[in-house]
Amino acid sequence: MNIRAGLQSLIVLAVLFGASGGRAQEPSSAVPPTFAPAPAPLPAMLEPPFLQATVTAGDLPPVQERIPQRPAIVGFDGETTRVGRYGGMLDVLGGSAKDTRTLVVWGYARLVGYDPSYTLVPDLAESVDIEEGRRFTFRLRPGHRWSDGAPFTAEDFRYWWEDVANDPEMSKFGPPVELLVDGEKPVVECPDAVTVRYSWSKPNPYFLAALAGAQPLEIYRPSHYLKQFHARHAGLETVQKMAEEEDERNWIALHFSKDRSYRNDNLDMPTLQPWVLKTDPPSDRFLFARNPYYHRVDTAGLQLPYMDQVALTIASPSLIPAKAAAGETDLQGAYLGFSNYTFLKRAEERGGYEVRRWLASKGSRIALFPNLNSSDPVWRELFRNADFRRALSVSINREDINNAIFYGLAKPGNNTVLPQSPLYKREYLTKWTQYDPDLANTMLDAIGLTERSRAGLRLLPDGRPMQIVVETAGEEVEQTDVLELVRDDWRKIGIGLFIKPTQREVFYNRVKAGSTQIGVWSGLEHALPKASFSPAELAPLNPEQFQWPAWGMWAQTSGQSGEEPDLESVQRLMALKAEWGAMEDEARRTAIWHEMLGIWADEVFTIGLVQGVDQLVVVSDKLRNVPERGIYNFDPGAFFGMYRPDTFWFDEGEQKTASAGTP
């Protein structure tokens, strides 16, 4: 199969590699920008005014010399989306300084990436040749450069593969699990400066989807920048001295501190994204300026992005809805709950924005994650008992939650696929979700939890009162409101609930360490799958799966860390996931999905509460090319990423610029 973008007509990638030629969910009301054939002849490139002074001074080459010889061409439908104009600064709000990664997610420059039909298309790569699903040859764009002007070539791929991923000091667990097929590493070749080839003896259906992720598997690095921190290239004595000067424990820690492209917190690290960080952390306001060497252009000869700058202002998550209502953001989805809908709608005219409702493709708006790998042996034993998890589930009045928090507009039920997915069955949504506290009490008694404290709480086998601490990342008031209703329900079956908000990083670390009893988060990341999508979310995959972090670590490190799953039902999920990866037959893949979804619903590994809650998106009245109706999802989709925010632009009158002329 051959895929080409840019100067050639676009051919979509086969569903074998985790994409879908069609879409089961609601279509967007706008036709998003797509990579298009280049016009003949290509219009003369126009210099962005923001960079003109720098070019005139001779400090930056003209745009014709900065873009690749064959750039990625972006086209529009001419009605709901159209060619824009240069200028302006996009204001967005974040909940912490770590949200600088937002610009990597939204920027969505990937070797291959999803378009809004969830089809994989080349992007940074000019083309991808695929043979038998196991041999992938990437052709890079000649003349493509990093944001500092250094060439982006096969050497950047070789450096990561040989000097990082396969250096035992740098990567003690070896290459990422997405690059292993039954434990087999790929053969990586770089025949010339613009060609990279990854090959396995068997198909790897996870490879391209990982490259297209919101937090992508980056198989390249800016080698010209990072070599100065690597002992093999700069010399051990030199890099150790640098590590001491920067208060790092050794040169490896120094290299890691410089090589954090996803975190996007290193001012000096070159990027391929549309906007480049210009504010050194820590700060409460981060500025990003256009990448002078960005690889996408439109059909009118304008190098993207249209907007010169992005300003990320940090605020308390609880204040972000109020700030959005005051018009302090031009594009906002994060930190907005459905409970903010009425408040935000009332302030639309005054705030100069529109509230749009996008389809959220989560398996559950809010889900509870009992930690089956809890470090507390008593709780661990209970959480591994399916009847205990079922009792917790049937004791929750989901209809009350729906009516009180979501205006009755959600669907009470499990954390599972949405009705718009062809894999949906109603029993996956309803299994063990009926409100039946009598059944819950009977099940808990049958487990042996019959003793009670004077306060009426059941006692654990070791005599402690049954008080469950539910931990949150402290970012959504909606979660706390829901948990207060769950607390009332669980009190009726003799179980106490305490809510413990914390910071996201602390929350993640406690989950991985087994310190949490139950965590709260949203459900399945992508609940609109077809059989051609990987079912990896339903089995241990990584340590950030809050219900089984130690098993996820074991899977991620190929058994070198964490714990091997010892529950029969989980072992079955893992076996089915492995079979899916080796199976190309669509009927069998469909059957595998249904068996996994059936196990997932019956075992109640996570306790979903409601699904089908729209995501609110606040869009400035002057911002163009943003779909009226879209799909809001982290992975796949990268929130706004697959709608190409580099093509969003401000209509005249909204030309805010913090420091015009500064690249």
Image (cartoon, rainbow, N blue to C red):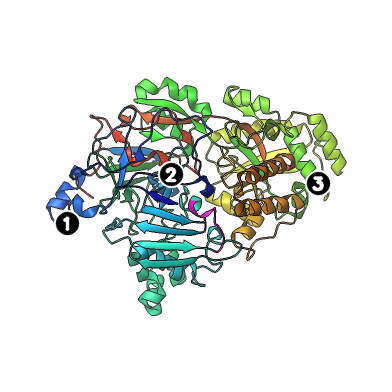
User: What amino acid is at disc 3?
Assistant: Leu
Q: Mark 3 = which residue?
A: 460
**Which range of residues does the magenta coloring cover?**
201-208
Q: Give the foreground label among 3 and 1.
A: 1
User: What amino acid is at disc 1?
Assistant: Asp
Q: Nearer the viewer, residue 316 or 222?
A: 222
Q: Residues within 10 Å of mark 3 (few under 14, many from 20)?
A: some
Can residue 450 be seen by looking at this rendering?
no
Q: Mark 2 = which residue?
A: 12
Upstream in sequence: badge 3 or badge 2: 2
* Mark 3 to mark 2 CA distance (whole Å): 56 Å
* Mark 2 to mark 1 CA distance (whole Å): 40 Å
Upstream in sequence: badge 2 or badge 1: 2
Q: Is residue 522 magenta?
A: no
Q: Mark 2–mark 1 contact, CB under 8 Å? A: no
Mark 1 falls on what kind of element?
Answer: loop
**Image location of residue 269, percent across then percent down:** 35, 59
Residue 486 against residue 403 in the figure, above or below: below
Q: Nearer the viewer, residue 474 or 407?
A: 407
Q: Mark 1 = which residue?
A: 59
Residue that appears at 47% across and 50% down: 215
Residue 506 against residue 527 in the figure, above or below: below
Upstream in sequence: badge 3 or badge 1: 1
Determine whether, in the image, residue 381 is placed left or right of residue 176: right
Q: Mark 3–mark 1 contact, CB under 8 Å? A: no
Q: Residues within 10 Å of mark 1 (few under 14, many from 20)?
A: few
Mark 3 falls on what kind of element?
Answer: loop
Q: Give the foreground label among 3 and 2.
A: 2
Residue that appears at 44% across and 38% down: 116
